[in-house]
Amino acid sequence: MLMHIHTGKARPALACVGHRAPGAGGGMGGTAGPLRVLVDMDGVLADFEGAVLRGFGTRFPGEPRVELAARRGFSVREQYRCLREDLGAKVASVYEAPGFFLGLDPIPGALEAMQEMIHMQDTEVFICTSPLRKYEHCIVEKYKWVEKHLGPEFVERIILTRDKTVVSADLLFDDKDTIRGAELNPSWEHVLFTCCHNRHVQLQAPRRRLLSWADDWKAILESKRRQ
């Protein structure tokens, strides 16, 4: 069925999501329903960080920049602002520009993993991504990127929301190390996808990390299915 995801901060998006009762999935206390997996887009499927660095160097060649090895913290804008106040707005102008999101390179192995995941038995996979607050180009380009790289089947599986905690699922693969929102206890387990800005983050058990798409993501799905 069709469901609008809207939290008041972002424009509503259309996604194919079925109603889900607590305990209906493998990782939510029952085994009656399929395992539902949410996969973030920027930093997990699409190389946001690499494109920002290249774009900043091209647009502002004389300015100091933050190399990927030096990235710390989820917000690239805040880290650049710490270098110099005006650099925050300059780096934001890179990823807010038309064509930025559509031109992102896929993360190695991401497309293959998604195509395999969508065909796994008793598994539902959705792309769950947060648009920029300055959304003029971002939203349309995210849809176009998905259609270009993953095909129309995945376009029907996009969930756009500023608050991922209100989306019901068993697993969320996301590069943001801390995800907060209206729901204090989200239904999903957050698996941290390794990106340049979170490599230094030390996770406390039982939290899990996926190092890359070459890592054993299937084992994470299967362990969740057994819970």
Image (cartoon, grey):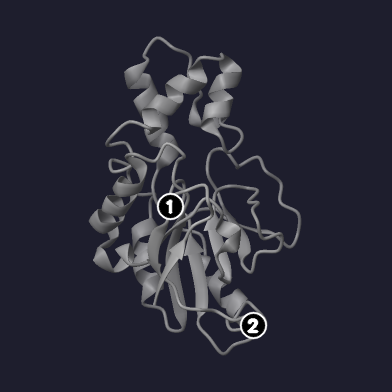
Q: Quadrant of the N terminus?
A: bottom left
Residue on which the image places disc 2:
23
Alpha carbon of mark 1 to alpha carbon of mark 2: how far? 27 Å
**Which mark is drawn over residue 11?**
none
Q: Is residue 137 above or below residue 183?
A: above
Along the viewing direction, whichever of 131 and 126 lies nearer the viewer? 131
Question: Tag 1's secondary structure?
Answer: loop
Determine whether, in the image, residue 9 is placed left or right of residue 116: right
The x and y percentages for residue 104 are 33, 42
- In front: 184, or 201? 184
Q: Earlier in the sequence, mark 1 or mark 2?
A: 2
* Relative height, residue 42 to residue 14 (above, below): above
- Position of residue 143 in the picture relative to residue 124 (left or right): left
Q: Quadrant of residue 60?
A: top left
**Tag 2: Cα neighbours inside 10 Å, few (<14), some, or many (≥20)?**
some
Residue type for callout 1: Met
Crowding at dot 1, Cα within 10 Å, few <14 / some 14-19 / many 20+, comes out as many
Q: Which image quarter is the C terminus in?
A: bottom right
Left or right: residue 165 versus residue 12 is right
The residue located at (56%, 69%) in the rendering is 168
Q: Which residue is denoted by mark 1 in the rendering?
A: 41
